[in-house]
């Protein structure tokens, strides 16, 4: 199978491409250079994985363009990279993904939606851990954390295997707090002020501070055969 990865040059796209190649599929990362010619770039692809840049200012328009290009290129299968808990009015970028999900569901293509949690790799805990992990929210707030390699394998599973059309999967590798991650890495965690950051990030940190972002782990384990 040939799979176009729309927005495929970042860490998410690389993880998906690696897992696809491991399964014997052909991965075609498509970045900004291919955006205006996306129909041609998706030519010959059986499926597409659609991931938007973080905090895209108009994710529904991005998704709509990818879906239209997929239709015109003859792509049969779409997997959309959304987010855990997409309908959160406090966070505009989550709402953009909620609308993206709606567009995918009514696209007329065979679709699957993945709702990933926060990447474990955001905390750089492999190798030499920092003396203190500093985050602008409660270090004891609970999250569904997702390993990038697990995301890639889950994406490859739903792209290549039967039985996932019409499914929406929340994905997390583990449930934990930043304080727990820090303790496991032999370091400490500390809450700090956000400082001068864009309003979207400030809203996200404020939500995390109050509620975290929990996500279940059973779906991931089931997809990867770990139950």
Image: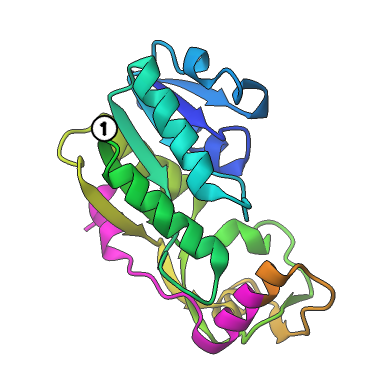
Q: Residue furthest left?
A: 163
Residue 124 lies within the magenta run: no
Location of residue 188 by image quarter:
bottom right
Question: Which residue is found at the position 74% from the left and 61% from the top?
Answer: 128
- Asked if residue 6 is positioned above or below residue 146 in the image, the reply reads above
Question: Which residue is found at the position 71% from the left and 80% from the top?
Answer: 136
Using residue 9 as the reference point, say whether residue 2 is left or right of it: left
Give the prevailing secondary structure in the magenta stretch.
helix
Q: Give the range drawn in magenta.
A: 203-227
Q: Is residue 91 visible?
A: yes
- Nearest the camera: 65 or 97? 65
Residue designated by label 1: 109
Using residue 60 as the reference point, say whether residue 1 is left or right of it: left
Question: Which residue is found at the position 62% from the left and 33% from the top?
Answer: 9
From the image, which quarter does the C terminus lie in? bottom left
Tell me the crowding category of disc 1: few under 14, some 14 to 19, or many 20 or more residues within 10 angstroms, Cα based. Answer: many
């Amino acid at each position: 199978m040939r799979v176009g990865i729309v927005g495929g040059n970042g860490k998410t796209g690389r993880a998906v491409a690696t897992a696809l190649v491991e399964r014997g599929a052909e991965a075609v990362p498509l970045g900004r250079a291919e955006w205006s010619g996306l129909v041609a770039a998706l030519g010959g692809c059986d499926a597409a994985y659609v991931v938007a840049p973080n905090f895209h200012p108009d994710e529904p328009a991005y998704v709509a363009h990818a879906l239209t290009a997929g239709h015109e290129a003859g792509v049969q299968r779409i997997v959309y990279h959304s987010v855990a808990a997409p309908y959160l009015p406090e966070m505009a970028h989550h709402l953009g993904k909620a609308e993206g999900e709606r567009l995918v569901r009514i696209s007329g293509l065979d679709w699957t939606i993945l709702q990933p949690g926060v990447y474990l790799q955001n905390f750089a805990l492999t190798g030499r851990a920092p003396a203190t992990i500093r985050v602008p929210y409660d270090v004891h707030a609970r999250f569904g954390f997702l390993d990038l390699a697990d995301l890639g394998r889950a994406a490859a599973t739903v792209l290549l295997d039967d039985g996932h059309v019409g499914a929406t999967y929340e994905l997390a590798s583990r449930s934990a707090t930043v304080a727990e991650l820090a303790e496991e890495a032999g370091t400490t965690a500390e809450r700090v002020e956000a400082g001068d950051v864009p309003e979207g990030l400030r809203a996200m940190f404020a939500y995390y501070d109050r509620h975290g972002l929990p996500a279940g782990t059973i779906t991931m384990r089931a997809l990867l055969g770990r139950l």
